[in-house]
Image (cartoon, grey):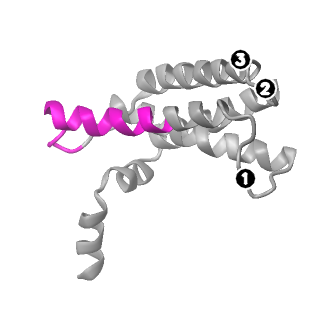
Amino acid sequence: MAATPCPARASGPAYWVRRVAWPLAIALLIFFASSRSHVASPGFTRVDDKFAHFGAYGLLGTLVCRIRGGGWRAAGVSLLVVSAYGASDEWHQSFVPGRMSDSADWVADTLGAALAIGLYTQWGWYRRLLETPVWSRRQVDAR
């Protein structure tokens, strides 16, 4: 099943700003959280931490894949980019006092991105859900 491109309004500078701004914002949020010696969290255990990595990098993977509209090539490139970002984030943490680098975190990052990218690429209903603006969904639900 080939991925369908995003809606017809998918052109111009505003489109690219919307497509690129969110993945950059999430990547910056991850970077700044990794730069802190202590990250405020609701008492995460080691297992909870892996789920947090899985979810955050799943979101990042989907957003990176959306830049090119999906498809297997975009999915492969997105997975490589997000996995490399996860590895660089773990390396970055090794220099932050009070933090340590953990390869299990990188595995959780990569698996989360792989699952989210796979869902986005293969499941049309999921992709349409993500691509339909919220205000459009509200109008359809109101009918």
Q: Earlier in the sequence, mark 2 or mark 1?
A: 1
Q: Residue at x 34, y 36 (%)?
A: 21
Q: Give the residue type at disc 3.
A: Trp
Quarter of the figure that contains the N terminus:
top left
Say if 120 sits above or below 96 in the image: below
Question: Label 3, on which residue?
Answer: 91
Q: Which of 12 and 77 is in front in this view?
A: 12
Dot 1 falls on a residue whose secondary structure is loop
Q: In the image, residue 74 lies at what x, y percent?
A: 42, 24
Q: Which residue is drawn at 21% across and 37% down?
A: 15
Q: In which quarter of the image is residue 108?
A: top right
Which labelled disc corresponds to residue 41? 1
Q: Residues within 10 Å of mark 3 (few under 14, many from 20)?
A: some
Q: Quadrant of residue 107?
A: top right
Residue 23 in the magenta stretch? The answer is yes
| Residue 16 located left or right of residue 125 | left
Question: Label 2, on which residue?
Answer: 97
Number of numbered tags placed on the structure image: 3
Q: Main structural element of the magenta stretch: helix, strand or loop? A: helix
| C-alpha gap between disc 3 and disc 1 | 21 Å
Magenta region: which residues?
7-26
Q: In the image, residue 101 lies at what x, y percent?
A: 79, 23
| Residue 48 located left or right of residue 3 | right
| C-alpha gap between disc 2 and disc 1 | 18 Å
Dot 2 falls on a residue whose secondary structure is loop
Q: In the image, residue 48 lies at what x, y percent?
A: 79, 50
